[in-house]
Amino acid sequence: MRPHRFTFLLSALSLAALALAACGGGRPPVVATAPMDPPPPAEAEGTALTPQPVDLGPDFRPLEGEGLSEDYLAAEKEGNPLRDIHFGYDRATLTPEAQAILEQHALWLQTHRDVRVRVEGHCDERGTVEYNLALGDQRAQVAREYLVGLGVSPERLTAVSYGKERPLDRGGSEAAWSRNCRAHFVVSR
């Protein structure tokens, strides 16, 4: 039984050595430098496409109001069209709804290049002050970075965390806590 295992092991090692020898030497692999064709649309498979950040470049400027929802145009007349985005409990990840709101923010910011925005991270009252300051910072940073990925200049965006120090809703209910887990956007010129 032992000689059979030895023969099998020796055969496997010989085969591996042959395979490596066959791969060695020769020309290096060809590296494609041309852009690859995009994958087929996901609708054909029955799934929805996920919006991807697009580099619009420094010269991009859509027509006034182009691509903006009616909510944005109405809120702009009131002074701040940048709505809050909300996060799940103990989370700093963007939901699809938050991503859609940030995409609208990026469009608005591209048409208002004189505007600067402070992204404020907020939390609910649960947890320590230190923990919530860190979580609020993560929330503010993830929103800021998403906007930068959509073409907003990073110099126009600052991030700050208020943790649980500035609640929107002072209630102690689940609904109040949910409203407080957010990123808020303060516009200045």
Image (spheres, rainbow, N blue to C red):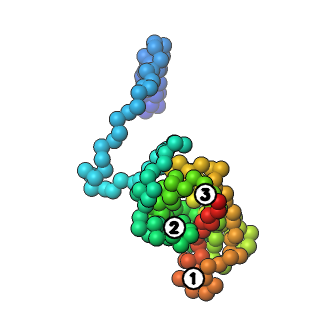
Question: What residue is pinned by disc 1?
Answer: 176
Q: Are marks 2 and 3 in contact (CB under 8 Å)?
A: no
Residue 114 location (% of width, % of height): 60, 54
Give the residue type that dot 2 points to.
Glu
Q: Quick check: 164 left or right of 92?
A: right
3D distance between C-alphas at marks 2 and 3? 12 Å
Q: Nearer the viewer, mark 1 or mark 2?
A: 2
Question: What residue is pinned by disc 3?
Answer: 115
Q: Is residue 122 above or below residue 102?
A: below
Question: What residue is pinned by disc 2?
Answer: 76
Q: Quadrant of residue 138?
A: bottom right
Give the quarter of the figure containing the N terminus.
top left
Q: Residue at x 53, y 82 (%)?
A: 175
Residue 130 is at least partly visible in this image? yes
Disc count in the image?
3
Residue 174 location (% of width, % of height): 55, 83
Q: Secondary structure at mark 2?
A: helix
Q: Residue at x 50, y 58 (%)?
A: 108
- Of the two numbered discs 2 and 3 on the same chain, state the one appearing first in sequence: 2
Q: Is residue 14 above or below residue 49?
A: above
Give the residue type that dot 1 points to.
Ala
- Of the two numbered discs 3 and 1 on the same chain, state the one appearing first in sequence: 3
Q: Is residue 157 above or below residue 182?
A: above
Residue 135 location (% of width, % of height): 65, 66
Q: Residue at x 49, y 45 (%)?
A: 60
